[in-house]
């Protein structure tokens, strides 16, 4: 049966209750929980093993992800893979998804430029993220960026105040009782926007450290 809980708006009517990741991914193509499905090329769901100890949550798909239908296949994805390897984590062992499943963008000529999702989009997509966490049952969730952290923790988050800590999931995700810890870190795309090489190297080192913290928590 689909979810009918009234305080989770948007996607809940399309989310199969108790489904595995494959079923969720297939069902997400029919989701009309917010308006983002219309201009996007397709829903972008997840990648990685459905029994991973670590789940990585980003913000939303980018232009290339929207076209290819898989999360983190663009420049931010390559940087994330490098950071995972530097942290001693095999990229293929983590489950990767986004808080929002459709690409929100603004058009400028022939280009489609990233536009940050609104809180309403995060809330509308939350039933999918909750269902994924319930299906995968990870020990640690890594929220990359403020949008993902808000989705996971259920409140506005300042990355600089919380990053790198092992956090109690608290009152965020409804299935948080199955997650031992949450780690908040910077989204890889934020590093790509840094022009200063020293700043970029520092932030990259922090991302690696945060991923290492998550990995050590499941050993």
Image (cartoon, rainbow, N blue to C red):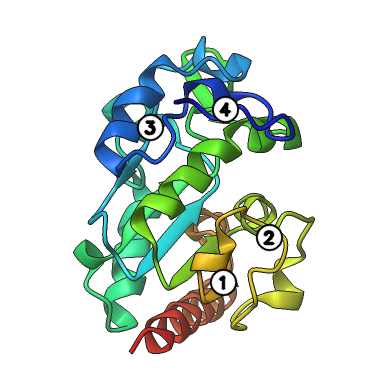
Q: How far apart are the two marked residues, 4 and 3, measured between alpha carbons? A: 17 Å
Labels 4, 3: front one: 4
Picture disc at residue 44 = 3
Question: How many residues crowd around disc 4 within 10 Å: few (fewer than 14), some, or many (20 or more)?
Answer: many
Numbered label tally: 4
Q: Is residue 156 visible?
A: yes
Q: Look at mark 2 in the image and give the residue it sits on.
A: 153
Looking at the image, is mark 2 or mark 1 earlier in the sequence? Answer: 2
Q: Earlier in the sequence, mark 1 or mark 3?
A: 3
Quarter where residue 13 is shown: top right
Pinpoint residue 63: horizontal percent, then vertical percent. 42, 30
Q: Which mark is residue 12?
A: 4
Of label 2 and label 3, which has the lower sequence position? 3
**Label 2–label 1 contact, CB within 8 A:** yes
Q: Residue at x 55, y 46 (%)?
A: 59
Chain-order first, disc 4 or disc 2: 4
Label 3 sits on a secondary structure element that is loop
Which SS class for mark 4?
Answer: helix
* Disc 4/disc 2 C-alpha distance (Å): 19 Å
Q: Nearer the viewer, residue 25 or 207?
A: 25
The answer to whether marks 1 and 3 mark residues whose Cβ atoms lie closer than 8 Å is no
In front: label 4 or label 2? 4
* Position of 18 relative to 57 (above/below): above
In percent of width and height, residue 61 lies at: 45, 37
Occupied quadrant, residue 62 = top left
Disc 1 crowd rating (10 Å Cα; few below 14, some 14-19, many 20+) is many
Q: Which residue is mark 1?
A: 182
Query: For the N terminus, which image quadrant?
Result: top left
Q: Is residue 15 above or below residue 111?
A: below
Instruction: Check residue 34 in the rendering and tell me which mark sits there, or answer none.
Output: none
Q: Residue at x 59, y 75 (%)?
A: 199
* Residue lying farthest to the front in this orientation: 1
């Amino acid at each position: 049966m689909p979810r009918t809980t009234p305080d989770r708006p948007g996607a809940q009517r399309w989310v199969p209750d108790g489904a595995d990741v494959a079923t969720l991914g297939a069902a997400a193509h029919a989701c009309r929980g917010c308006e983002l499905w219309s201009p996007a090329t397709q829903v972008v769901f997840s990648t990685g093993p459905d029994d991973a100890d670590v789940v990585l949550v980003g913000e939303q798909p980018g232009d290339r992800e929207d076209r290819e239908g898989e999360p983190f296949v663009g420049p931010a994805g390559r940087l994330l893979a490098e950071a995972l390897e530097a942290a001693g984590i095999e990229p293929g062992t983590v489950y990767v998804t986004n808080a929002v499943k459709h690409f929100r963008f603004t058009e400028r000529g022939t280009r489609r430029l990233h536009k940050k999702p609104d809180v309403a989009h995060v809330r509308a997509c939350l039933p999918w993220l909750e269902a994924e966490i319930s299906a995968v049952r990870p020990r640690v969730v890594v929220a990359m960026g403020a949008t993902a952290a808000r989705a996971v923790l259920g409140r506005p988050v300042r990355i600089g105040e919380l990053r790198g800590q092992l956090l109690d999931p608290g009152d965020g995700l409804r299935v948080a009782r199955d997650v031992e810890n949450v780690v908040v870190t910077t989204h890889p795309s934020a590093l790509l926007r840094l022009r200063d090489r020293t700043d970029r190297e520092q932030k990259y080192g922090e991302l690696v450290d945060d991923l290492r913290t998550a990995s050590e928590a499941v050993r």
